[in-house]
Every structure is written in structure tokens, then in C-alpha cells.
Image (cartoon, rainbow, N blue to C red):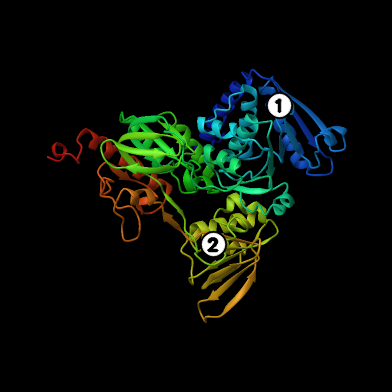
Amino acid sequence: MTEPPAQDGMERAVLDQAEAQLRAVLGRMPREVSLLLFTSATANQVFSDAFRQVLRAIRTMAPKVSLREFDLGHPKAREHEVTAAPTLILAPDRAAIRWLGAPLGEEGRVLVEALLMLGYGDLGLAPESERILAKLSEPRQVTLFVSPTCPYCPQQAVNALKAALARPDLISLSIVDIQIHPALADRYDAHSVPQVWANDVLIARGAQPEELFMTCLSKLQEETVFIPESDAPLVEADLVIVGGGPAGLTAGIYGARAGLKTVVIEKDALGGQVATTPVVENYPGFTQVGGKTLVDIMVSHALQYVQIFPGEAVLDIVAGQPLEVATSRRRFQARAVLLATGAGYRHLGVPGEARLGGRGVSYCATCDGALFRDRDVAMVGGGNSALTEALYLQNVGARVTIIHRRDRFRAQEHLVQAVAAAGIPILFQHEVEEILGEGRVEAVRLLDNRDGSRRQVPVQGVFIAIGYQPAVELAKKIGAGLTPDGYLQQDERHRTTVPGVYAAGDVAGGARQIVTAAGQGAEAAMAIFEDLVHPYWTESGSA
């Protein structure tokens, strides 16, 4: 008998452990949770069947959960104003929450979170969030657009659920799966996820810290930074790591194992760019693994050693001893800080790009690709990411054309061959000069670098993968030196030019690979441990 591959056994063990934990926590829920599922034999039957199977499986684990199912033609559907299937109404006696879709992929986490909140009655709201919601005096009808392939959506969905459960007298919530209800997404021009609308006003794009979400909901407008009304609690640590990607998570493990009290702060989805990578094929130990699966393994490992603060944006770092780190929720004092802030998407900087962001312009094919099934889209770029995402877009049903300003790709050869085998059209030596459209993307204007001619190509989406911009804003605030290429300057021990502040991962440049980022995180943590024993920034430590 052939033995199963090692990675299959590891993933199976992780899944078995997760299922056991889920069964235990759902089985202890003290409160009854009633669910109403509306289905149809003629509309989205596959998704209705999937939803039904998921809910039945949950009921075997959660005795306090009750389920009643109705057809769209039943009077109950008219009573609850349900017109689409599948639709799930959660605890109609206690809140106004409905789910238009099915809990597949990332959305499964959202359903579990919702049941736990309802079953335990513990929302875990931050004090600032409670104060903001307490001041709310007018109704809010919230519509949240999500996708099963979006790792950022669960964080925003949890924010919305907390709001709807905390103020059921004023807040109603509809969670909409864009893959099952593309027409509704079109009506709102919701061409990226997560997106949140309240009272038909766009209030948020992307995942947010909880308090920032509540602020946007209260003000009915998009906000970018939340500043607490009062000082947040103080956390003291030996090492504060800013960034929860492979470098930061690995550094957390190594720092804690060296005996340092270590914390990790991450403003966005844990895992960084890896979380939105469809398939990883070059990480040792895994012939092929989903990016999100790899992130989940890393996070689970790190949580055994360090405290992680997700959804917190670092607003400022004050150099000195101790170093002061201020986030959107609290303050930290640390003997050392590791900047593992990674790199963000590089923009084209052409007219129409910013204006049509979220309305056809996207930087994440795995998040938004499903919206463009049977539509013409452009993939701009010629590296590994661009070709990988072009293949993904074709796989989900988009008609994709690659636009690259050079005469050949910079990607690995196996990706170049895969694109050729897939028959994806390519426009070499062309540049996007402008993205055109009124309320959404309608076309791109291209410059032919060979003869200087210009032409307009109709597309409904533009996906951009032209590299990354190192996230060095915090480093600039404290006066840390940068390289000529704009990356964070460091020596062989990962020290920046600011005493006590270190760097690791994509923010410092290099190969920009998962394995190298993890290696740099380990190196940096060990160097920090040695420096804290013999501080190089003091006279005695440098002697």
C-alpha cells in the first residue's frame, strides 16, 4: 500500500484538530439559536444544497441550534421579505441579520463566528466601539459584499455582525455573496470585496479595525484612520513585531522561544501577500499548498508562543528606551521593535486608476476575480504574480489579456509555459496610459512602445500586478535610513539605523519569497535576543 504524502497527513491532522475544537466550542453554547433557511428548486439549487449540508453538519455539533427550511413560495418568505435563494436568517427573534449566499471557503468562518456570538452572547466589543454604537440614534441598513476566496472578508463580516447584534434596534445586516448574486453587486457597483454600504452609502472598502468600522458606520462615510478618544491600555514586552506575514510570525516564534516576551501587531489579514496567493509551489515541505492554508498553519504555530493583535494599525513609533509603539487601540512599550511590514501593491499611477478603484480596478485576483466571470479583463504585469493571477482569472471564467511593457516576461519559465499552454492573449511592449469609464471600468488606452501608436481596448476589469512598494512609512517617521531603491536599510544583523529597531522580510528588499522572509524573521529574532543581552546602543554594550 502506498503511503500518503507527508503534507497530506499534516493538513489532515490540522483539519482534524480544528474540527474537534469546533465541535467542543459549539457543543457548549448556552443559548438557543434559531435559523431560517429559504431555498428554491429552480434558483441556485447547488448553493442551496451546500448551505443545507453545512447547517445540518453544524446541528450535529451544536444542540442549541435549530433549523427550519422553507421554499421561496412559502408565506414565511413573504413575511420576512425574502426574494432570493439561498437566504439564511439568523435568530430573527433577536436581530435583523440575513445571509444571501452559502458559507463556502472563507465565508464558513463568518458563519461560525455568527453562531458563536449568538450562542454565547459575548461580542467582545472594544470599549471605543461600545461608546460609538451607544451614541447611534438613527437606523442603519448595512449591506456587506463578500466572496468565498477573500481572506479579508471575515474580519469585516465580524465587525458588521458585532454592530448588528449590539444594536438590533437600529442596525440590520445583509451579507451578500458576490458570486451567487452578481446582479446585486452590479447594482451597488461593488466590484471588489469586502465592501460595506450603509443606507445605500459606501462606507468601507477592505478590512478594517473594529473601531474604524464603527466610526464609518456612525458617520456614514469612509474613514481611513481611527484615533481613540482616550488612551488605550498599555502592553509591555521585550519585542514588538510590526507585521504578521511570514517574517513577523517566524520572528515571533523564535523570539518567544528565546525567552523574550513577544507580541505581533498586524493591521490587515495575517499572512500578508501569502494569504491571497492561490497556490504556493515552492515552500519546502509542500509540493503544492494553498496560500491561505499555509498561513493558517503558520498562525496556529505562532499562537502557541506569542500574543497576536490583529486588525490594529500602528500609528507611531517613538525611539528611545523603552521604545513606544502606538496603535489604533493601545500603546506598547518594548526593548526592541522589529519592522516586518512587508510591501504593498505598486500602482500604475495613470489617470482613472484611483477613481475606479473598487469599480473594476483591482490588485487581488483571488479576492475579486469571481466578479468578472464571462467578462473581458486586462492583467497588467509580467512577473510571477501577474502570470499566476492571469491563470487564476481564466480558471474562474474571465476572458483575460496580459499587458506587459517589455518584450518578454520576467516570470519563472514554468509560468510562462503555463500561460502559453492556456492560450491567454498577450500584448507585449504595451503600456496602460489611462483607465477609462464613468461609474466603472469600460476600457484601457494603450501605448504601443514599438511605434508610439495608441489604441483603446474595451475591458470591464483591470487587474494590476506590477510589483510591490515597501511599507516604510513608519520607518520614515522615526528617521530610519532607506536604500537607494526605497527599502529599509539594515546591516548583517538586521539592525536599522535607529537603535533598537530591526527589519526583516520584504520591507528590506531581497528575493521577496516566503521562505526568505521566514528565514530573515528567524535571523532577526536571534540577533535581537543577543543584542538585548548585550545592547550595542549603550556604551557598556558596545565595549
Amino acid type, residue under disc 1 in the picture: Arg
Q: Quadrant of residue 121?
A: top right
In the image, which disc is placed on residue 417? 2
Residue 254 at least partly seen:
yes
| Quarter occupied by the C terminus | top left
Q: Which of label 1 and label 2 is nearer to you?
A: 1
Query: Circle 1 is placed at which residue position?
Result: 94
Is 29 or 514 nearer to us in this picture?
29
Q: Is residue 188 left or right of residue 328?
A: right
How far is the residue under mark 1 from the one under mark 2?
55 Å
Determine whether the residue tagged by mark 2 lies in a helix, strand or loop. helix
**Residue 239 percent across, percent down from the top left:** 33, 35
Check the image and report above or below for 233 versus 272.
Answer: above
Determine whether the residue tagged by mark 1 lies in a helix, strand or loop. loop
Q: Is residue 302 left or right of residue 543?
A: right
**Residue 149 percent across, percent down from the top left:** 61, 45
Instruction: Say which residue appears at 45% left-offset and 39% top-offset.
Output: 328
Q: Residues within 10 Å of mark 2 (few under 14, many from 20)?
A: few
Instruction: Say which residue appears at 55% left-offset and 62% top-offset.
Output: 353
Which mark sits nearer the N-terminus, 1 or 2? Answer: 1
**Residue 402 percent across, percent down from the top left:** 57, 65
